[in-house]
Image (cartoon, rainbow, N blue to C red):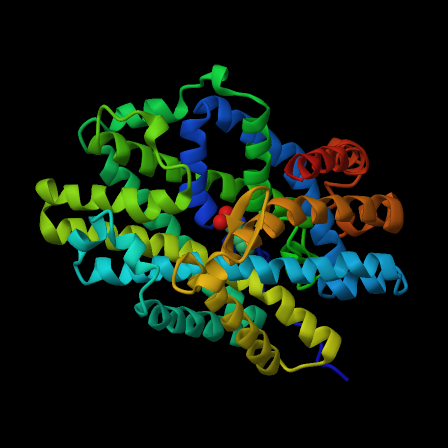
């Protein structure tokens, strides 16, 4: 007999935990860079439309399945279909995907932790050296940082839903928000900062094309932690009194707000550092931005605010990103852990131990695929390119399986579970949702054009 299912202690706790999952490295860096390169305000507008009209309904589908079944994604698909084999595959995908994404996300989080360590200890000059990153990701120090990060994740998840995940989110999310706003205020006082703001918000519709639109949707989907079984799992820790649609709206709003505000930090900093910058030169990836571009800015700040000031700003920034990353990793790792607890009746400790071991092995494989070990660096080759183990995870899981999982959950709620049951679940605890235009919109979109759009994204990737 297993113990009664754990639950979040309050609606606020749930919202902060889910927002903690959603707010991550994607918000802090990926979004601002993508927005700047792809038409500023025009990108912001498209992104916001996708969040409200596509991602929010998918989030409701995931949360409702979780709360209804009160199970992990595999248990949910299985119990709601009487053990149907095909839907079980969807359940498996929702367990494997988060695990694999955890691997690649953990590698980046470990790097962030290393940069945080070096900022706190005042090694700005070293971090700003363009060669540092290459050495850093291939250095053995990495294993030390990895152990530290894993210990933090273990400590949080060990506490369970209320004492672990919820408590961490209640501390980290408000702290993150305050630090973010404080940094924005500081950055806006720098010379030329408003050029950056202008560049970020003024729309340039000429930059919008099909690939930008596709990119905006993928970014929004990933940012809201969809297609990874997370919202199913977090939803399963909710009681029937919680207003799910209202909470989901808050999560989407918080996530989007943090992404937007992060742009008010990054772009003014970039422009004040280099007033003549051509935004096409901004690094294509979040990784390049965090680990090579921003450290140069932190070092340059020494001239205005001194060594201690500049180190403090850098430390603040990396701590902020680290908090964002940790609350995301915790959510993603909780999915396979919950599945082991549910399906195999493992204790939390035992599930964490086994999954942790597997995660360490896979993460070492991914972390050593940047040159340390040839085998993982040139792991396979396809599409005419040699791919590292890390690349494979990104290509397969981030680019391909995420939209597929989104597509499956949409089809599942409307055509297998049925619209009436889906609505009934969401109406509970949310009297205002019942018969609202929003409910009608969600039903319609989840059953029609959202799966079509996700299918198009999928086809486009393949
Ligand atoms: N939403 C996170 C982000 O924007 C991404 C993420 C969440 C990744 C949870 C994995 C797990 O960075």
Q: Is residue 169 visible?
A: no
Question: Where, quadrant-wise, is the N terminus in this rendering?
Answer: bottom right
- Farthest residue, direction top: 206
Question: Which residue is rendered at x = 17% and y = 29% of the image?
Answer: 191
- Where is residue 347? Give x, y as percent: 64, 82
- Where is residue 62? Give x, y as percent: 71, 51
Q: Which residue occupies the foreground of this view, 280 or 377?
A: 377
Question: Which residue is rendered at x = 49% and y = 63% of the image?
Answer: 375
Question: Where, quadrant-wise, is the C terminus in this rendering?
Answer: top right
Residue 172 in the image: above or below residue 219: below
- Farthest residue, direction bottom: 1
Residue 158 in the image: above or below residue 19: below
Question: Which residue is rendered at x = 81% and y = 44% of the image?
Answer: 411
- Where is residue 208? Give x, y as percent: 52, 20
Q: Which residue occupies the foreground of this view, 358 or 11?
A: 358
Q: Which residue occupies the foreground of this view, 168 or 21?
A: 21
- Where is residue 297? Give x, y as percent: 22, 41
Locate residue 222: give its quadrant.
top right
Q: How many marks?
A: 0
Q: Is residue 362 visible?
A: yes
């Amino acid at each position: 007999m297993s113990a009664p299912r754990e639950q979040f202690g309050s609606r606020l706790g749930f919202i902060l935990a889910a927002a903690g999952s959603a707010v991550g490295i994607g918000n802090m860096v990926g979004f601002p860079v993508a927005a700047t390169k792809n038409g500023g305000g025009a990108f912001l507008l498209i992104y916001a439309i996708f969040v409200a009209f596509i991602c929010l309904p998918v989030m409701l589908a995931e949360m409702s399945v979780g709360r209804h079944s009160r199970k992990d994604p595999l248990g949910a698909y299985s119990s709601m279909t009487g053990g149907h084999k095909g839907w079980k595959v969807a359940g498996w995908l929702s367990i494997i995907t988060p695990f694999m994404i955890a691997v690649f996300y953990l590698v980046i989080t470990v790097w962030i932790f290393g940069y945080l360590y070096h900022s706190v200890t005042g090694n700005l000059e070293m971090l700003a050296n363009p060669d540092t990153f290459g050495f850093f990701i291939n250095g053995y120090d990495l294993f030390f940082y990895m152990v530290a990060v894993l210990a933090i994740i273990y400590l949080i998840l060990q506490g369970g839903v209320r004492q672990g995940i919820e408590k961490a989110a209640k501390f980290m999310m408000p702290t993150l928000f305050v630090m973010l706003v404080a940094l924005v205020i500081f950055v806006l006082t720098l010379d030329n900062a408003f050029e950056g703001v202008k560049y970020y918000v003024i729309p340039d519709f000429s930059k919008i094309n099909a690939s930008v639109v596709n990119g905006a949707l993928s970014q929004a989907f990933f940012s809201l932690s969809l297609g990874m079984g997370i919202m199913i799992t977090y939803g399963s820790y909710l009681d029937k009194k919680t207003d799910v649609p209202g909470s989901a709206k808050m999560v989407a709003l918080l996530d989007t707000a943090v992404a937007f505000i992060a742009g008010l930090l990054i772009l003014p900093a970039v422009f004040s550092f280099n007033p003549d910058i051509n935004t096409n030169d901004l690094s294509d990836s979040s990784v390049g931005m965090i680990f090579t571009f921003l450290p140069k800015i932190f070092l340059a700040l020494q001239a205005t605010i001194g060594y201690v000031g500049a180190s403090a700003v850098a430390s603040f920034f990396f701590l902020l990103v680290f908090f964002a990353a940790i609350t995301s990793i915790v959510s993603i790792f909780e999915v396979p852990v919950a599945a082991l607890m549910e399906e195999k009746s493992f204790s939390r400790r035992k599930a964490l131990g086994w999954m942790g071991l597997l995660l360490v092995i896979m993460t070492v494989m991914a972390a050593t695929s940047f040159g340390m070990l040839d085998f993982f660096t040139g792991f396979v080759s396809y599409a005419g390119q040699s791919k590292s183990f890390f690349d494979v995870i990104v290509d397969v899981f981030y680019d391909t399986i995420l939209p597929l999982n989104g597509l499956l959950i949409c089809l599942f709620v409307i055509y297998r579970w049925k619209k009436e049951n889906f609505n009934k679940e969401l109406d509970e605890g949310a009297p205002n949702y019942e018969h609202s235009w929003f409910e009608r919109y969600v039903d319609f979109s989840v059953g029609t054009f959202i799966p079509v759009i996700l299918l198009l994204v999928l086809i486009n990737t393949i």
